[in-house]
Image (cartoon, rainbow, N blue to C red):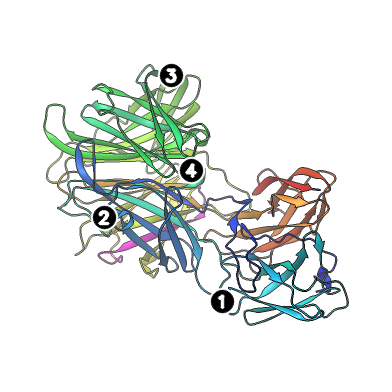
Amino acid sequence: MKHWSRRFGVVLLALGLLVASSAPVTANWSAPTPTASLWDIDEQLVVPYLPNNETLAGTGPWHGTVTVANASNFPVTVDIAKADGSPITSVNLPGNGSTTLAAGTLFGSNPGGGLLLSGREQGGCASQAVQEFTKTRGTPANTADTIALPVPSGVNVTQVVVSQGTTLYAAPADYTFSQVGTTLNISWAPAGAEPAGGSAYSVQVAYDFPCRPARLSAAVKLMAPAPSTNGRTSSTHLMVSGYAGLSRASAVGSTLVAPIAQANYSGWKTVLHVTNVGSTPCSVTVKLYQHPSGTQTHTLTQAVAAGATWNLDLVAAGVPNNWLGTARIEGVGCQLTASIDRIKPTQPWGTPVNMALTNLALPAGSLTSTVYVPLVFQAYFDWNTGLAVTNAGGLPATVTINYYGTNGNLITTKSLGPIASNSMDFDYLSGSGGQLAQAVITSTQPIIVSVDAVKYTGVGSDVGQALTSMGINGPLTLTPGLPMPLLRVPLFQKQGSSGNDNSGIQLFNVGGAAATVTLDFFDASGAPQPPSPLTVPGIAPNGAVTIYAPSQAPLPADFQGQVRVAVTAGGPVVAITNNVNYDVQADGSAAFNVATGQRALRVDFGKVANKSGVDTIIVAQTVDENGVQMPAQQILVQGPAGLTITTSPAFTNMFGAATVLVKGTNTTAPVTVCWDLNTNGSCDASEPQVTQSMSWTP
């Protein structure tokens, strides 16, 4: 304890949890709220809209399921909340496990809506890394006070800070602490100062083993007219669609761009589902821009309550038939997310087809000028793909599309444009004979791309299929010294007695060298299944490979679980996954973008406003692709002149955490924390880092 005798006034904060005072009794404490905490990857997943027995574009009723996969190797609890954060339920997942929940289970008899998913480690760990207790000093002087710690047995206190107002007590001069089981003893036996008997004082406690954050992925499957309880479909269903849940950073913004919208255009009807994931009501405006001019033709406005969803049917809203274009969704200061259902009940001449596609609207600021498309059909068993390229920038866009064969050879190059701002253009890979391909799209402006695949012709029950995915924003940002991002497929199915749902994964090597990938298949319990580990070498640059469930003989029939794909050489690799069941009466197909996960730096900056001249502990934590902490990593903290920074560089401990003290005098200043991968003593631009403004006030 002597080590800490000079560190008075320390504000202990770790793992994004700010300590909060409770009533002045021994065992009571109030749950802290996250503050000043950033991850390089976003822990919370967003589901913009999950229907629950609802009619969409005159079809349905539509139902949904959400499959949540634990990409961590340790058990986690997943908290599922409504879009405003109101809790719905929590589910426990084993390491590498997954589960599927039906909309009816989550919403009951109420309409569906948006969901927020976040996870935390289970087991013998501290649910909060730091807690604050308000304690009443006992009598007589020089005796001890005790605090009951709300942590599992085996979790140890590593540090204690005791204060009363602006008075900070020193250990061991004023007090000492010890722990017996889950009881903390604060002994005032030393000869130094202590609080007056009967007065309240604060005790801040840090633990050695805080619960680790979960790494999650999610897939949303939509079906009509019957519900599904497990994500399987059958002949009771007429249409199926789906999309992947996104991290909050990827899904939420005040301005969203929808790649395509149709008002009974060639039979396709669009419903936008705009969800307010903020804590206050929001005035939302949807602006519609007509193809090909990009002229704004309609402005639709709606007040959306916190957590509510605006289901905007374009035809019902008065948009004329045969309207085709794009949409921007705006809410000043709002936190919005949106999905877009496009449904085709009939052909224009009246023949029923019952096809469905689901896209996502993405934050305008997240869009880039390079987009990857892992799978393009060209007359492949009667499947064909069309690319809808929308210009999200402020100037006309010139677009180049390079199509590659699965062997990586360039098939052809197409040019589009100039495409007016907020307008779109289309391209199809023409030819005969049938082939699979990939595409790299580059533009002079930021773009968003819808990748639509349809099957209007053929023989048998597989006619009338449709699926869509989102083009993947690039180029990928890679960090020197870190492995390639891990690919996470939350829902992978193989036919069997439970149904004929089958999944395929399309892996696209967008790097300049041949790639090798290793796939691991985990059932819902988290148990690895054959053919794990499946190694696929030699994916050519710009080439691709398909992993199709029925072609994997060792994979058990009726398999339903997750797949994780590690890039062990070459790369990077991007992917989508398709899911098809031809038992569905009409359209049994869906596609899901595949999320990636990389090693990450997490930083907690302490309290937003700290006392002048008082040290604040900054806690940095490094985790691997599966959320496991990484020890012996070098952490740097940097700031302007006038700040006192102690113990930088610091090295992460066995739990992947490192602490650095920062102190200022009547100042507000930016503080940067970085993971010094190359150990050169500076925060290089390519290294993971987080910057936040910190204040020290009188």
First-in-chain label (2 vs 1): 1
Q: Nearer the viewer, mark 4 or mark 1?
A: 4
Q: Which quadrant of the rendered structure holds the N terminus?
A: bottom right
First-in-chain label (3 vs 2): 3
Q: Quadrant of residue 291?
A: top left
- Residue for badge 4: 278
Contact? badges 2 and 4 (CB < 8 Å): no
- The answer to whether residue 98 is above or below residue 373 is below
Contact? badges 4 and 3 (CB < 8 Å): no
Contact? badges 1 and 3 (CB < 8 Å): no
Q: Residue at x 81, y 64 (%)?
A: 168
Q: Is mark 3 on a helix, strand or loop?
A: loop
Q: Which amino acid does label 3 sit on?
A: Ala
CA gap, disc 2 to disc 4?
37 Å
Q: What residue type is labelled 2?
A: Asn
First-in-chain label (4 vs 3): 4
Using residue 595 as the reference point, say whether residue 107 is left or right of it: left
- Residue for badge 3: 420
Point out residue 496 in the picture as x, y percentages from the top left corner: 21, 63
Q: Which residue is drawn at 78% across and 74% down?
A: 197
Nearest the eye: 27 or 360 = 27
Which span of residues is magenta-colored? 554-572
CA gap, disc 2 to disc 1?
43 Å
Q: Which mark identifies residue 548?
A: none
Q: What element carries label 2?
A: strand
Contact? badges 4 and 1 (CB < 8 Å): no
- The answer to whether residue 229 is above or below residue 687 is below
Contact? badges 2 and 1 (CB < 8 Å): no
- Residue for badge 2: 502
CA gap, disc 1 to disc 3?
60 Å
Q: What residue type is labelled 1?
A: Pro
